[in-house]
Amino acid sequence: TDPDLKTFRFQCIKAFNIPINAIDTQHTLEQYNRLTSVLRGDKTVGTGRNMQRVSDHPLGVLFCMYSMAKKFVSHVDVKPCVLFAYASVIVELWREFPDFGKLLLGAFHEQCPYLIPVFWPQQEGQSNEQYYKSLGYQYIDGQVEKQELFLKRIIAMTQLYAAITITPTRAGGSKPHPHNLMFSWRWMAAMLSLDPQPDVSATLLYSYIKIAGNKMAVTYRKQFFKLIHFIKNNYLRRIKQVTPEDQSQQSIYILEELVNNIVKTNHVPPPEGQLPAKLW
């Protein structure tokens, strides 16, 4: 490989990794501006004689878009308030750079196909490793990751995706929200039309409702509560039927408790960490 190209790639990754890692509720605009500089190709990377703009390589901007999308999606250790700061930056980047949004969706669907949503069946001739990777599992030293690590990652991705759909755009500008609440409705309706899977179905529904449920309830009202009643009266029973007795029932219990509380109070609490509408 070309050592100069390798160095250029490293410098490009560094140019967006630093602002992504620095996103919080206090410096959202600053980090957004740094990231837009990268995606416009204006950002200068490298030092001394090796300084060049991201756009100096014909694939520089596209490489940054692709790598940045994967970075956002794979960021799992995010506190609730930072989650919404991430979502706010993503929404604005997506508005400004539609191709970034397409790559972001692709990264979500590759790393967590349940966000399509789809449950891939194992194909004839497909090895277990190939199959598990198609579901989003990671392999470490030839061993599939533990279930709790897998669930932690898909919860983080699900929460970020849901947060994107409920995060308002900045004031000003004529471009609409690129992936609004309608996509949350589509996801949940499609999810409930699939045959449930042990662990995964309950975990994802719980995570999604915790983030987007409040805004969905306010926006869709009776139609949303019909979905909640469907989960309570139908889908939970079907999840229990496909869950082996020797497998943890924790994900079922927490979803059941959440749904019962929503039905009892006719209310979904707003998500923890949600930011004010006029953050920037």
Image (tube, helix red, strand yellow):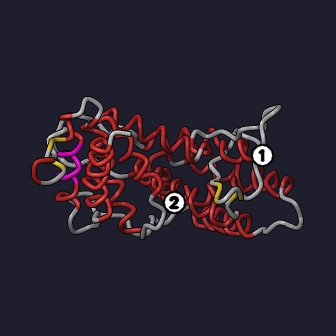
**Residue 122: x percent and y percent?**
78, 38
| In this rendering, position of residue 11 left or right of residue 48 | right
Determine whether the residue tagged by mark 2 lies in a helix, strand or loop.
helix
Quarter of the picture containing the N terminus is top left
Q: Which residue is mark 1?
A: 128
| In this rendering, position of residue 73 left or right of residue 53 | right
Nearer to me, 160 or 2: 2
The quarter holding residue 139 reads bottom right
Task: State the mark number for residue 156.
Answer: 2
In the rendered view, tell whether residue 170 sits above or below residue 214. above
Mark nearest the camera among 2 and 1 is 1
Evaluate whether residue 202 shows in this view: no
**Residue 135: x percent and y percent?**
66, 45
- Magenta residues, start to end: 32-38
**Residue 264: x percent and y percent?**
63, 66
Determine whether the residue tagged by mark 1 lies in a helix, strand or loop.
helix
Q: Residues within 10 Å of mark 2 (few under 14, many from 20)?
A: many
Residue at point 87%, 60% (across, down):
244
The magenta stretch spans residue 36: yes
Q: Residues within 10 Å of mark 1 (few under 14, many from 20)?
A: few
**Residue 166: x percent and y percent?**
40, 51
Amino acid type at mark 1? Asn
Nearer to me, 279 or 153: 153
The quarter holding residue 23 reads bottom left
Evaluate whether residue 253 shows in this view: yes
For the residues labelled 2 and 1, the Cα–Cα distance comes to 25 Å
Residue at point 22%, 53% (across, down):
32
| In this rendering, position of residue 115 left or right of residue 120 | left
Q: Residue furthest left?
A: 48
